[in-house]
Image (cartoon, rainbow, N blue to C red):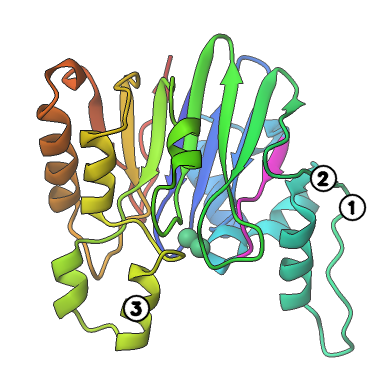
Amino acid sequence: MGVSVEVLASGSRGNSTIVQSSSTRLLVDAGISCRETFKRMKAGGGDPHSLSAILITHEHTDHVSGLLVLARKLKIPVFMTGATHQAWSRALRDADGERPKLDRLEFFSSGHSFHIGDIGVTPFTIPHDAADPVGFTFRSEGMKVAIATDLGYMPASVRDQLRGCDLLVVESNHDLEMLRVGSYPWAVKQRVMSRVGHLSNSALAEFFATDYDGNASYIVLAHLSEENNHPELARSAAEKALSGRRTLLRNRVMLAAQAEAMQPIRF
Ligand SMILES: [Zn+2]
Ligand SMILES: [Zn+2]
């Protein structure tokens, strides 16, 4: 079977990705409904009831909206940081101030690796306006996969985490010019462009053109804005940056979508 990655949904209306080895199946973020998660998994030939655990990057709605129902239905552990859990449960308090309960909750800390089954998980801090946001790298069967979306810029610490990856799921959120002239209120534009907002096509291109080691067979451009980006703009910015470095031409650039799951990428 080997390692495979399937982006079920990506974008500001919901994010969810499956990372699996031969024996362990992880759901990274639960940003679409339980029903939609099941539907998309089954369409790709996967069995939702075979999921081993759910990992959460941060508490924004587009990463957790399906979490409670999924966790209760599947009865699998949910992994997040203590601060993310605080922020998430506070936001979901009911009228009596009662917080939602997860039966199987596990805490991790950024920078501290742990194992779920035969997958080694390393959470790392990303610059984003949430309580304690993280990206992840996953190691199994000699492969390394990274997921890094929802970051205002690409600090050296994140660049380090992205070295030696076989597959990179990385944010290419907006085209700066489309954002500038687009319909978002100024305050929202400022938030998106800020150091704790989202990564632009050009900021990602700058990473590809300078620090990126070129190791990945697949690069998945993710969390594209539907308002302020176009898939072909994101793709051409990335490909142009990679093609400036001849050694990187074997990197295959793919696009994650909001409305449907990507074909699973298998190693
Ligand atoms: Zn976010
Ligand atoms: Zn997001």
Q: Which residue is mark 1?
A: 103
Tag 3's secondary structure?
A: helix
Label whose residue precedes the other's in the sequence (3 or 2):
2
- Using the rendered image of the protein, determine whether residue 44 is visible from the camera's viewpoint: no
- Whether the residues at callouts 2 and 1 have beta carbons within 8 Å, the answer is yes
Task: Say the numbered circle drawn on residue 72.
Answer: none
Where is the N terminus found, in terms of image quarters?
top right
What residue lies at 78% left-to-right and 69% top-to-bottom?
89
Disc 1 crowd rating (10 Å Cα; few below 14, some 14-19, many 20+) is few
Q: Nearer the viewer, residue 103 or 105?
A: 105
Q: Nearer the viewer, residue 29 or 214?
A: 214
Residue 104 lies, in percent from the top left, at 87, 47
Label whose residue precedes the other's in the sequence (3 or 1):
1
Q: Quadrant of residue 219?
A: top left
- Residues shaded magenta: 53-59
What residue lies at 60% left-to-right and 56% top-to-bottom?
133
Q: Which residue is mark 3?
A: 190
Label whose residue precedes the other's in the sequence (2 or 1):
2
Tag 2's secondary structure?
A: loop
Q: Residue furthest front?
A: 156
